[in-house]
Image: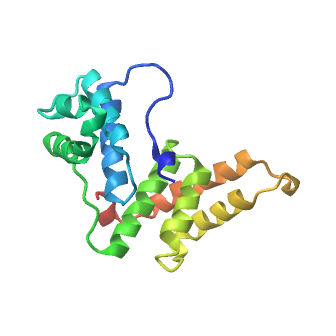
Amino acid sequence: MQAFFSQTPTEKTLMTRDDALKQLSHIARERAFGRHVGSDRLIQAGLDALVAEVESPSIAMLAGLLRSEEPEAPALFDQVLEELGLSFHPPADPRAAKWAMAYWIAGQIADGTLDPATGTHLIWSDIAYDLGYPEELQSLVSCALNLDEWEESWGVSIEELKREAVEAAKQFLGKRPAVEAGS
């Protein structure tokens, strides 16, 4: 599933500095929430950031790692995050960490950076179950089930179901307690 989180542009256009910082931050969260991110992707993110003129004492070292040096990438990536102030640590409490992950995924669904079918499935399979299917996640779980089981005979398009998932994500985010919104 981790491949679905990729934020790397598919076009051959250069990344802006802001895009590169967003990519680094995104990968930091992926890793913090327990997703595997390969060393090749960490090195590529470093290279993208270097080309986008992101300045950090360790970024050139990360970007320049050779295949034989890939085992060094995670530690160097963490060092780059620290230098840029982009380190992310989820809450220590497992339930709070699951909620933080739910808000993060919902935010990506809402802003269009994560496919609604993929995002709602992650919330359903990786979060809602562990939290005992709380009421707050019910609409997103319902969207996941509808998207997962959709058939053309239903008389509603898959695009409409995806729009409903985006709306459910926005509503979920809108109900987020103010204390948690800053995390």
Q: Position of residue 168 (x, y in %)?
A: 58, 58
Q: Position of residue 76 (x, y in %)?
A: 19, 42
Query: Eyeballing the image, is 86 above or below 19?
Result: below
- Residue 97 location, quadrant: bottom left
Residue at the left extreme of this rendering: 57
Q: Position of residue 82 (x, y in %)?
A: 16, 46
Left or right: where 19 falls relative to 118? left
Q: How is the image coloured?
A: rainbow
Query: Eyeballing the image, is 52 above or below 68?
Result: above
Which quadrant does the C terminus fall into?
bottom left
Front residue of this view, candidates 161 and 68: 68
Q: Residue, x 50% and y 62% (percent of image)?
A: 172
Front residue of this view, candidates 94 and 37: 37
Left or right: where 36 falls relative to 160? left
Residue 151 can be seen in this image: yes
Residue 166 can be seen in this image: no
Left or right: where 59 falls relative to 129? left
Q: Position of residue 51 (x, y in %)?
A: 28, 21
Residue at the right extreme of this rendering: 153
Q: Residue, x 33% and y 54% (percent of image)?
A: 31
Front residue of this view, candidates 151 and 76: 76
Query: Eyeballing the image, is 2 above or below 46?
Result: below
Residue at the front extreme of this rendering: 68
